[in-house]
Amino acid sequence: MSQVTELKSHPLVSHNLAILRSKDTDSQRFREVAKRLSSLVLVSATESLNTVEQELETPLIRTSEQVLAADIWLIPVLRAGLAMVEAGLDLVPDAHVGFVGLFRNEETLLPNHYYKNLPDFSKSANNCFLLDPMLATGGSACAAIALLKDHGATDIRLLTLISAPEGIKEVFAKHSDVVIFTASVDEYLNDLGYIVPGLGDAGDRFFGI
């Protein structure tokens, strides 16, 4: 499995990215498109999950199918990561949800912690999907990944809608075992730490602020 999977070449991904990026897209449509785009990223991220064979009976015969071999955990980085949770639960209704609360200091660009609600992942087999629409400097992602590892997580997949090369580099420098799934790897970070061309502040646009 490649360390970074970018989905921008898919026509549905690029089409929805165009809507999401546009400054003329209002909050309601932004939420709808963010959910749709999150679903596409999630489908890609689940493609390599381990499965086991399970026997079952249809109305006609006895047969078997492959089912997920481990628990799925959806872990949004608050607050913007909430934009991706609903899409995850639509795809995997039995998934568990944990939370990591971080915010970025706009002067230092470093993450500050204010909340976490995570289990002891070492007690059972699991796949952790860390959800954050924007991977900018990588500081928040690295802090969240470190928290998951402190709680015993070993299979961590970072799912984003937009990623900056600088953020990807930072994540792999500190957590080389993590894989990233993103709709788009954008061009660069500007002096204010915003992704270019990006889509602005995903949290503000999602919540209509």
Image (cartoon, grey):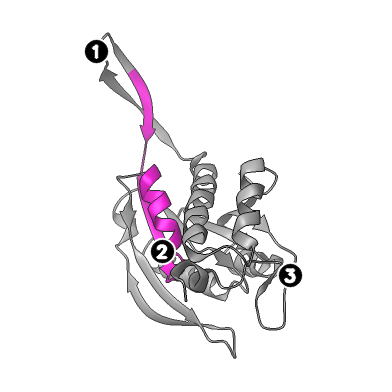
* Residue 82 badge: 2
Amino acid type shown at disc 3: Tyr
Residue depicted at 57% across the width and 58% down the height: 161
Q: Quadrant of residue 191?
A: bottom right
Q: Which residue is mark 3?
A: 188
Element under disc 2: helix
Q: Residues within 10 Å of mark 3 (few under 14, many from 20)?
A: some
Mark 2 or mark 3, which has the lower sequence index?
A: 2
Mark 3 to mark 1: distance in Å?
55 Å
Judging depth in this view, the residue of 69 and 116 nearest the camera is: 116
Q: Which type of secondary structure does the marked residue at label 1 adopt?
A: loop
Q: Is residue 82 left or right of residue 59?
A: right
Q: Which residues are magenta?
A: 64-91
Residue at image coords 52%, 74%: 140
Residue type at mark 2 is Leu
From the viewer's perspective, tell me whether residue 11 is left or right of residue 71. Answer: right
Residue plotted at (53% across, 56% down): 159
Q: Disc 1 marks which residue? A: 59
Occupied quadrant, residue 178: bottom right
> Are the two marked residues, 2 and 3, in contact with CB atoms closer than 8 angstroms?
no
The amino acid type, in three-letter code, at marker 1 is Pro
Q: Is residue 2 above or below residue 52?
A: below
Q: CA distance from mark 2 to mark 3?
A: 25 Å
